[in-house]
Amino acid sequence: MDWLGLQFITELPRSGQVILNCTHDPFLVLAAYLVACAASFATLDTAERVGHADNPTSQRLWRWVGAACLAGGLWTMHFIGMLAFQVPLEVHYRLPTILLSLFFAFGASLLAMYSLGQPRHTLWQYVRTSVWIGFGIASMHYVGMAALQSSAKAYYQPGLFVLSILIGIAASLATLSIARHLRDGSGMFHQLLKYATSLVLGAGIIGMHFTAMAALNLVVPVGSVLIAPSANNHLQLGLTVAVIMLLIIGSVISAALADKKLQNKERDLRRVNALLSQLDQARMSLQQVAHYDALTNLINRRGFNQIFAEKLIEKTTEGGMLAVMFLDIDHFKRINDSLGHDAGDELLKVIAHHIKGSVRSHDDVVARFGGDEFCILIGLREREEARHMAQRIMLKMKEPIELAGRRMVMTTSIGISLFPEDGNTCEDLLKNADLALYQSKGSGRNSLHFFSSNMKTRATLELQLEEELRYALREEAGLMLYYQPIYDLKTGQVTKLEALIRWQHPVLGLLPPDRFISIAENNGLIAELDNWVLRKACEDLGTLSRQGCEELKIAVNCSPLNLAREELADEIEHALRLAGVAPQRLELEVTENALMGNIANTLVLLRQIRALGVSLSIDDFGTGYSSLAYLKRLPLNTLKIDRSFIQDIPKATQDMEIVQAIIVMAHTLHLQVVTEGVETLEQYEFLERHGCDFVQGYLLSRPVSLEELLPVLHEINQRKHSHSVSPLSLARGITALTSPDPFPKSPGPHGGGSVVRPIR
């Protein structure tokens, strides 16, 4: 086979010709190997740049730079290898054929760079591409060999010829495979691995070249004139070309390294920008969380305070009015307790929508402070604008709301403070609006109130009383018990006493319970106060026992809040044991509303108290919402009729019928009946005539201290005439013993005996 003057398959002539022995210059062989290694390294480096380039233009640029570098390296390696080839005759090279070989080198290199630039290839694609690249490199070599001109004729050994092509294909496949794994690496190990790979690939390329050279045989016909080679500088030329190519390859590698650093900086900059963007989003999210309520999407207290401060500065500078409105949903806790917190959350969303829809514009600020508490900040021209808006909100709130399959109507209490009339700072205005809200809630709810200065005075006084009450409880200073007799109509004796608390304030004098009981309930002191009353009553009962009143009982009021505490039974047992008093001599009075508040838990606690031997009385009966179905299940001993049913007897016929019915019902349930607030002889005779068991009121005695009690009891008990009391003797006794109690009984526990002044 003859191609470009080269014999590939043709057998060597058997006679008449001379086969020349050729050698290679080892220094130029080493230079060719270094160029091949450098070209391999540059190829791997530029392949990374193609893979990491961010835009198609950069990818295309580095692909062409890599192809030119690889083609130049391969061709230079081949050129130096040819210069290293030493033939014992004169040789020349054809320039066009040399340039043609460079074309094949560039084509193979460009195909290699396109393949290296692809992110993923299958094994078959790698093999197919490697075959083409191998054939391209082999074509470059053998076309370059065809440029050699001499008197000898070139013959190639077929086996080594095929092997050289296979080595080129294998080197190409190795380059493609290794470059894929080196594309995404970094660090010192990655760089060392790239160096080692370059040495191996360089060996493969140089191996392919010298395998092809080993397949070459130069044959000179017999009789041909052998022209000795002229003096040449192949070594100097080869080294010069090697140095130039290495410099070019080094420049490409340096450019690739600089581009890599620049790209890393750009990537770092993008990462920093991405992080800054994420931080900005996180800041906005945190700001949303910090200044907005997650449930209703209204601003929260912190966001409201920030806007409020800005509005105050604006109004202070430019003039104008602001209104701060506190809103509290009436009886919202019942929704959470009965329907669950999820239903409560849904209700809050609806209410927030109602409030937001009731304000005038985006200039009005609506915030949720937490729970069921909302706050509105609006600009005003006159005071009545705030009232009209509050009324509009209250009207909107009365629209029925569908929730958990139920149709319900909610109401709200509103407190309003005005700038600059009620304060000049955010703190003062919010505090004053809260005081006005407290007034609205205390007035029966579903109402609105503007702040007034007397609210602040009252709040300051209550705060002071709270602090002094804590001190009085801690030091047991100033608190005392008064006792009001409870008269047994059947025996004509005082068999019970009701313990009523008083507070001897160091400045304000003797305070009635309605001045401090609500303070104790609102500030978590009621349990401690009730416990003090219980211990003191048991202690006084022990003192009375030692004075000859061994059968006397004492009734102690229990706050509704205290009745919900599981520790109450243990505290009662401890107080009785400490005072050495029998449990049967203690009676606990609870209101019917307290009993019905949580009937299941209350029933368990009452049974524990009854198990101790303590009697139970239901106080103020008729004023709450007792259920007779539950009433018969409660372990009660006594039922106390509220004084409101007695005060108009005998004038009120309807009240007389109600009292008769209560007495009959109580006896049917095997309960004893106590009627409080008995003021007149007519009331006494009516109750005695209709079977009432006990009476209590100013007709018998006002509440007195323990020191005054024994003479009062002795005088009342001396007026016994069989099973009745003489009206005349009662009247005379009352004139001598009773004087007006300055503290009429309050609706809550620990009250006095009556709200009506006694008979004189």
Image: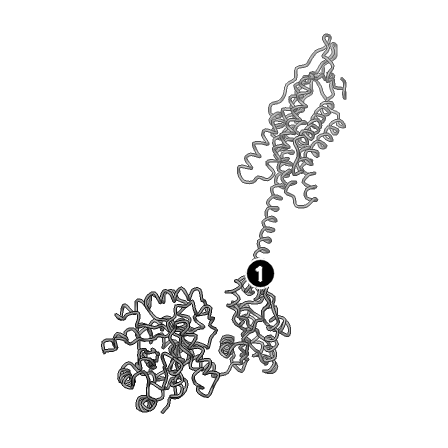
Image position, residue 278 (x, y; %):
58, 55
Along the viewing direction, whichever of 699 and 682 lies nearer the viewer = 682
Image position, residue 598 (x, y; %):
45, 67
Along the viewing direction, whichever of 744 and 40 lies nearer the viewer = 744
How did the renderer colour the structure?
one colour
Along the viewing direction, whichever of 615 and 460 lies nearer the viewer = 615
- Secondary structure under tag 1 reads helix
Image position, residue 585 (x, y; %):
30, 72
Placement of 59 over or under 401, stated as above or below: above
- Which residue is tagged 1? 284
* Viewport quadrant of the C terminus: bottom left
Along the viewing direction, whichever of 54 and 153 lies nearer the viewer = 54
Image position, residue 46 (x, y; %):
64, 38
Placement of 243 over or under 333, stated as above or below: above
* Viewport quadrant of the N terminus: top right
For this orientation, the residue located farthest to the top is 15
Placement of 658 over or under 181, stated as above or below: below
- Number of residue marks: 1
Instruction: Name which residue type carries label 1.
Output: Met
Q: Residues within 10 Å of mark 1 (few under 14, many from 20)?
A: few
Q: Is residue 331 visible?
A: yes
Q: Is residue 68 visible?
A: no
